[in-house]
């Protein structure tokens, strides 16, 4: 008997939705998601697990069940969780039947402490316990005391498909869980466990289902996505998976995030260069441009290797966009180390980067190091870095003006109501400047003439379909 079955049996709970008296009057479910794409993906799995009993609402005031999917990678999401739980307790005082569950990385780490610190919480579930959530809801509905479930490990097949994005054109599909790298600043190996790859057939099944429901683009997710298959016997290669995904009929584009430089080998670069459906975008975390700091971070590559990879990719994949993640103010980071990071940004000319100030996370090796860069200095370094990046990004965006690009339309533009937006293969967001003809819709691959840019996005006019077919502009709607 699995641990999961034991939990359910011991509590004498019938978790079959067909036998739940509440069915027929679905409750309202609000999910608040913090952190990374993996959490967004897990949240859609939660919505799918509960779809027999609850429908989603975007307003927590209307919810009967609120799930908070937490993140502990950085300081702020954790602080935000505790302030959110304070506000939710007030909501619960006004609406006592409201049920609150807390999951994700903070839940995995803190477990019962969350119940002790927050009287309004009904249950806590860990990163490998999503499939238990319907049972936890049932238990509380039937009067059981507040619950904590952080030990059980879901099998992949315990979870229904959930695609992680609000639009169905571009979806996430998880290909592995956990991480074996143990970067000294990162809590993920503790909260998500060792790396486990998902079976190829199961990944393909989820992608085919997403395509059947209208998806045109998939982003494969993994903490170190390109180490997929290394835990199988015999080992399998990430490139093998990409070639198989590229065979899925109806799928137009493939993305993945995030690859680790240590696992980049020749077959990976060959695959980037030879797979037409793979987008021309590589997001490869660097973290620091200093070998000394990379070593202290336990990042198992040095700058020379990182540059070799970038040069090889640029040579083999025309017009590839390269983006990265960077940390400033890691323990022991001197002005020279920081300058090495600026040099790396100049040398690589990243199209964009996500940059953060180091903050120690309890339970990591870096938390035991002396956090010796003062906060004001961290902030100053971050500003200098972001100013440099902004300059490069602005130049890169400007380089697209006047060119025709292929855009996969994803849905409404954030720029202006009634207009559509989508992304280029390099992952630049493009907002259409005029209303599209009525036949043009989200999910279409179109050709767009770029006319302008804003801070981080492009703007342009529809020219036709990506295959060169004309579009009937006489049918344009405002
Ligand atoms: S590679 Fe490093 S930073 Fe990324 S999840 Fe693993 S331990 Fe964390």
Image: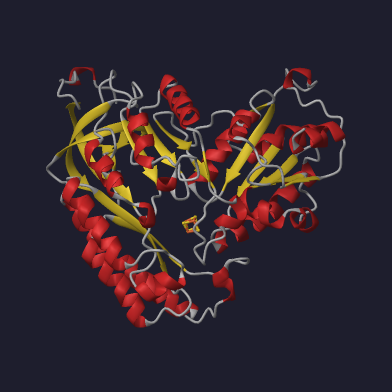
Above/below status of 435 relative to 309: above
In the rendered image, residue 461, in percent from the top left (x then y), is placed at: 19, 34
Residue visible at 73% across and 53% down in the picture: 111
Furthest toward the left, the residue is 402
Position of the N terminus by quadrant: top right
Position of the C terminus by quadrant: top left
In the rendered image, residue 474, in percent from the top left (x then y), is placed at: 19, 18
Residue visible at 46% across and 69% down in the picture: 297
Out of 103 and 199, give the one closest to the viewer: 199
Residue visible at 76% across and 58% down in the picture: 113
Figure colour scheme = secondary structure
In the rendered image, residue 95, in percent from the top left (x then y), is placed at: 78, 40
Q: How many marks?
A: 0
Above/below status of 451 relative to 80: above
Residue 433 appears anywhere in the view: no
Above/below status of 243 relative to 364: above
In the rendered image, residue 237, in percent from the top left (x then y), is placed at: 39, 41
Residue 447 appears anywhere in the view: yes
């Amino acid at each position: 008997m699995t641990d999961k079955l034991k939990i359910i049996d011991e509590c004498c709970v019938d978790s079959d939705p067909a036998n739940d008296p509440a069915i027929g009057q679905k409750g309202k479910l609000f999910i608040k998601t913090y952190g990374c794409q993996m959490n967004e993906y897990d949240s859609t799995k939660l919505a799918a697990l509960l779809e027999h009993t609850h429908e989603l609402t975007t307003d927590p005031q209307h919810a009967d069940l609120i799930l908070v999917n937490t993140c502990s990678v950085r300081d702020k999401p954790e602080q935000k969780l505790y302030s959110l739980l304070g506000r939710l307790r007030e909501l619960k005082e006004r609406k006592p039947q409201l049920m609150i569950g807390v999951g994700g990385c903070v839940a995995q780490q803190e477990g019962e402490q969350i119940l002790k610190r927050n009287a309004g919480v009904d249950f806590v579930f860990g990163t490998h316990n999503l499939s238990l959530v319907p049972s936890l809801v049932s238990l509380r509905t039937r009067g059981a005391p507040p619950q904590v479930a952080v030990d059980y490990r879901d099998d992949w097949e315990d979870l229904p498909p959930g695609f992680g994005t609000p639009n169905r054109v571009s979806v996430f599909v998880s290909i592995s869980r956990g991480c074996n790298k143990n970067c000294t600043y990162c809590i993920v190996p503790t909260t998500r466990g060792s790396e486990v790859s998902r079976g190829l057939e199961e990944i393909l099944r989820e992608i085919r289902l997403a395509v059947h429901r209208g998806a045109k683009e998939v982003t494969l997710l993994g903490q170190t996505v390109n180490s997929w298959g290394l835990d199988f016997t015999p080992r399998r290669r990430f490139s093998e998976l990409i070639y198989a995904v590229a065979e899925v009929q109806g799928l137009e584009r493939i993305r993945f995030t995030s690859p680790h430089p240590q696992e980049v080998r020749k077959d990976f670069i060959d695959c980037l260069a030879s797979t037409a459906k793979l987008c021309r975008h590589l997001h490869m975390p660097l973290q620091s441009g200093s070998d000394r700091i990379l070593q202290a971070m336990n990042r198992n590559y040095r700058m020379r290797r990182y540059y070799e990879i970038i040069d090889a990719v640029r040579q083999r994949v025309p017009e590839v966009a390269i983006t990265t993640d960077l940390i400033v103010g890691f323990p022991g980071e001197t002005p020279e180390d920081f300058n090495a990071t600026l040099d790396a940004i100049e040398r690589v000319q990243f199209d964009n980067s996500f940059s953060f100030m180091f903050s120690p996370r309890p339970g990591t090796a870096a938390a035991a190091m002396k956090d010796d860069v003062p906060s004001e200095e961290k902030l100053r370094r971050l500003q200098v870095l972001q100013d440099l990046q902004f300059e490069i990004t602005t130049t890169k965006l400007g380089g697209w003006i006047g060119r025709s690009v292929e855009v996969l339309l994803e849905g409404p533009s954030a720029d202006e109501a009634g207009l559509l937006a989508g992304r280029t293969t390099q992952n630049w967001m493009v907002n259409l400047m005029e209303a599209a003809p009525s036949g043009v819709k989200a999910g279409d691959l179109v050709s767009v003439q770029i006319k302008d840019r804003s801070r981080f996005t492009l703007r342009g006019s529809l020219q036709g379909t990506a295959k060169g077919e004309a579009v009937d502009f006489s049918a344009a709607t405002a």
